[in-house]
Image (cartoon, rainbow, N blue to C red):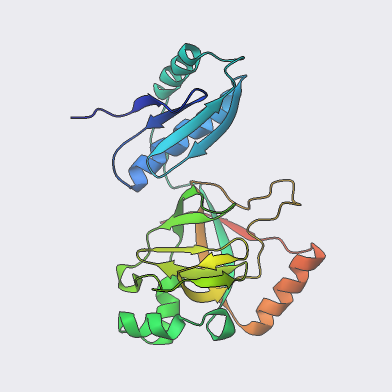
Amino acid sequence: MTEYPRILAAGDSAIVVEFGNEISPEINGRIKSFSDTLKETKIPGITDIIPTFRSVLISYEPVTLSYREIIQYAEKLLKKVNEVKNEGRRVFRIPVCYGGEFGPDLEDVAKFAGLSVEETILLHSEKPYLIYMLGFLPGFAYLGGMDSRLAMPRLKNPRLKIEAGSVGIGGESTGIYPMASPAGWRLLGRTPVKTYDPQREVPILYEAGDYIQFVPIDREEYDSIRKRVEEGTYECEIAEYSE
């Protein structure tokens, strides 16, 4: 039986610290605690820290840190890791205009779930989603906690291009496309918020361990927020998580 956490080599300039073999909020809590502690320690030679569903990838510069040294640092910091409680975590309230040209698959998802369109929107937006990790595209958040009634298979034939800000469902996952790209997920709506902007000081709006809650808006509100985003005057509302 595998004992966790465990440390594995990942090529000649990275290691992986695994915290378990499943996706769960508890494992995510330990990952966040370890990642935050590692960032705060500011170890010279570490070039990147990437949390995933069940592990943390640590890239380092071998001329500054040896493999033995990075292992020793990781082992020392693991002794300080505790599960991070939800209280105090950030919740990014992301406005979404559901349906219409922004959500061409909304009615199909509602029919699949045996719900009305209004019930589908409510179910999708009623609670915060935990960001387990970022990947696939810069700023693409893998979210956990979607109601299983909305779990609909991906499209058999992916769209060649969807617009940035599109909000969709793929299987048991939901998320926001941070840029225009091909996509096979079912589209429910679109947000005017730029979740990824390479011109910002911090390009990605949120990070793993934060939460996202979708807030339904109408087209008029969408256009108003979009204008403020383009003018650089819009600030995303951030709340504190509470169960």
- Image point 35% across, 73% down: which residue? 150
Between 44 and 66, the one nearer to me in the picture = 66
Q: Quadrant of residue 18?
A: top left
Measuring from the top left, give residue 211's x and y in whole percent. 49, 54
- Image point 72% across, 72% down: which residue? 226
> Is residue 23 left or right of 51 when viewed as pictured?
left
Measuring from the top left, give residue 86's x and y in whole percent. 43, 47
Q: Dividing the image into 4 quarters, which one contains the C terminus? A: bottom left
- Image point 50% across, 46% down: which residue? 208
- Image point 48% across, 17% down: which residue? 73
Q: Dividing the image into 4 quarters, which one contains the N terminus? A: top left
User: Does residue 42 show up?
Assistant: no
Above or below, 219 relative to 160: below
Above or below, 9 relative to 122: above
Between 43 and 178, the one nearer to me in the picture = 178
Q: Quadrant of residue 63?
A: top right
Measuring from the top left, give residue 29's x and y in whole percent. 40, 41
Between 212 and 48, the one nearer to me in the picture = 48
The residue most toward the right is 231
Between 193 and 16, the one nearer to me in the picture = 16
Measuring from the top left, give residue 49's x and y in whole percent. 54, 34
